[in-house]
Amino acid sequence: MNLSVDFNKYCVVIPAFNAGKTISELILKVQNLIPELSIIVIDDGSTDNTALIVSEFGSVRLYSHKVNRGKGAAVKTGIRIAQKNGFQYAIFIDADLQHDPGSILEFIKTREQYRCEMILGCRNIFGTKMPFHRVLSNTITSFVISIRTGKVIHDSQCGYRLIALENLNPFLFTNDGFQFESEFLIKMVYAGKSYQEVSIPTIYNTSGSSINNVMDTIRFIKIFFLSYFWF
């Protein structure tokens, strides 16, 4: 990276649920990429050895939910913890290795260049191993959110994001599940937050996936209609 960056103002937040098979590899990749970058893991009530593995990394901050509360709840906890520790920006990355840690540099570079408040990961999901129903669902969801916000958002369901933490109140977001991604985008865009998109590799595997396409589609429809009462 040609830019001179103060990495102390950035942290990586990893929401994790039963990620014992992947969390160690992910942490090591982040540490090898940028050794001075702080890592926060939010263990969302895992029943496997996720917390034990993370605790073996002395430099990694670990915070645990007593019970599984959902992806959105883990992200909100991550926001609060990052703010309390004085970080200005948090990069959220999934624990299942479906996000390439190497893209963290591009997120930071884009933030430093454009000074925007959100950097959104954007996958090219067409022609990949992602099942057709997932491609269709993500395409429709992104299209609907783009219509709702009046802004073009190519990958609304990608959780790989950089977020500016200043004046961000996590209690404004009510959803604790995967629909948090949609609620977050709609509310942030309506609040006038600036954003850029960063192309990231598409990595897809089914191991450990807790997404229920039918139920999550129903919940998204609910979020969409509720959004008309938010503003």
Image (cartoon, grey):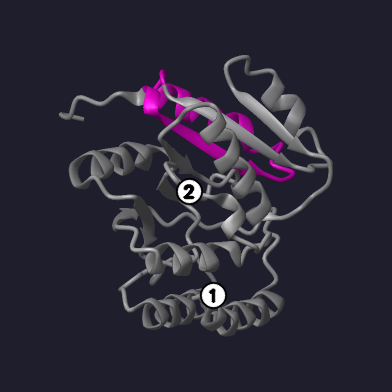
Q: Nearer the viewer, residue 19 or 67?
A: 67
Residue 48 position (above or below residue 3): below
- Look at the image and tell me in which quarter the N terminus lies: top left
Residue at the spot of label 2: 168
Q: Residues within 10 Å of mark 2 (few under 14, many from 20)?
A: few
Q: Residues within 10 Å of mark 1 (few under 14, many from 20)?
A: few
Q: Which mark is residue 230?
A: 1
Residue at position x 42%, y 41% in the image: 166
| Alpha-carbon span between mark 1 and mark 2 | 17 Å
Say whether residue 43 is left or right of residue 99.
Answer: right
Q: Which residues are magenta?
A: 8-36
Q: Amino acid at mark 2?
A: Leu
Q: Position of residue 77 (x, y in %)?
A: 64, 43
Q: In terms of image quadrants, where is residue 151?
A: bottom left
Q: Position of residue 150 (x, y in %)?
A: 32, 79
Say whether residue 185 is left or right of residue 107.
Answer: right
As helix, strand or loop, the secondary structure at mark 1 comes to: loop
Residue at position x 36%, y 65% in the image: 124
Residue at position x 61%, y 67% in the image: 179
